Image (cartoon, helix red, strand yellow):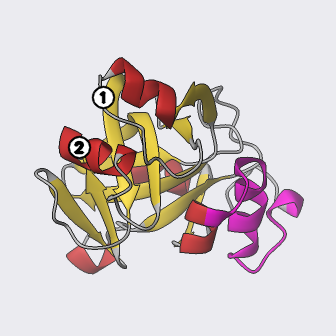
Amino acid sequence: MSEDNYLSNQFLVAMPALDDEHFNHSVTLLCEHNEKGALGLIINRPMTLKVREMLGQMQLSDADLNGDPMVYWGGPVAPERGFVIHDGPDEWDSTMNIGGGLFITTSKDILKAIGEGKGPGHYFVALGYASWAEGQLESEIMQNSWLNTPVDQRILFKSPPSDRWKLATRLLGVDVTQLGGDAGHA
């Protein structure tokens, strides 16, 4: 697969026939995809944990936190590991540019800034992630488990979690609910 064919900064939209408890009707923000594999964060599985509660557990101030956003279950791998997907500059200690004006940060300084009202304009906090080994994602796409589409930040930051799968499927220009589970390979 050439570098141009990697799917970083894409939504992976689970096909209706994908019958896996972790990924059924999921939308995953693909943060990194290369010859070694892929890493993504599921964006439509809110947890009961709120950002304010998480900040308190970390002994960080929440005095200027805007609202009380949810923390999301990002995937089954390393559920104790936190990620902040955000817009804006990459001014935090451990930040990776994933393209399209989006960044992923794993350092505590961004959470401190969010609690103090000095964080990025739009952000999304997730615990855990999804990963695929070398060639695994490509194989799953060929088996008709996933479709991909460019990221729409309105879906990521502004849409209710319960609507994200439906909205992401609309980006494909087809009614994905009408597609069958069998791959059509010529």
Tell me, yes or no, if residue 55 can be seen here: yes
Q: Which residue bears the numbered disc 2?
A: 106
x 37%, y 69%: residue: 87
Q: Quadrant of the C terminus?
A: bottom right
Give the side of residue 159 with respect to residue 82, left or right. right
Q: Is residue 104 above or below residue 168?
A: above
Q: Amino acid at mark 1?
A: Arg
Residue 166 x, y percent position in the rendering: 78, 60
x 10%, y 51%: residue: 93
| Highlighted magenta segment, given as a residue range | 158-178
Q: Kindly indicate the quadrant of the structure image that contains residue 173.
A: bottom right
Q: Which residue bears the numbered disc 1?
A: 81
Q: Are the residues flagged by discs 1 and 2 in contact, CB closer than 8 Å?
A: yes
**Residue nearest the viewer, comparing 114 with 49:** 114
Give the side of residue 34 with respect to residue 51, left or right. left
Question: Does 135 appear in magenta?
Answer: no
Q: Quadrant of the N terminus?
A: bottom left
Give the side of residue 71 with respect to residue 131, left or right. right
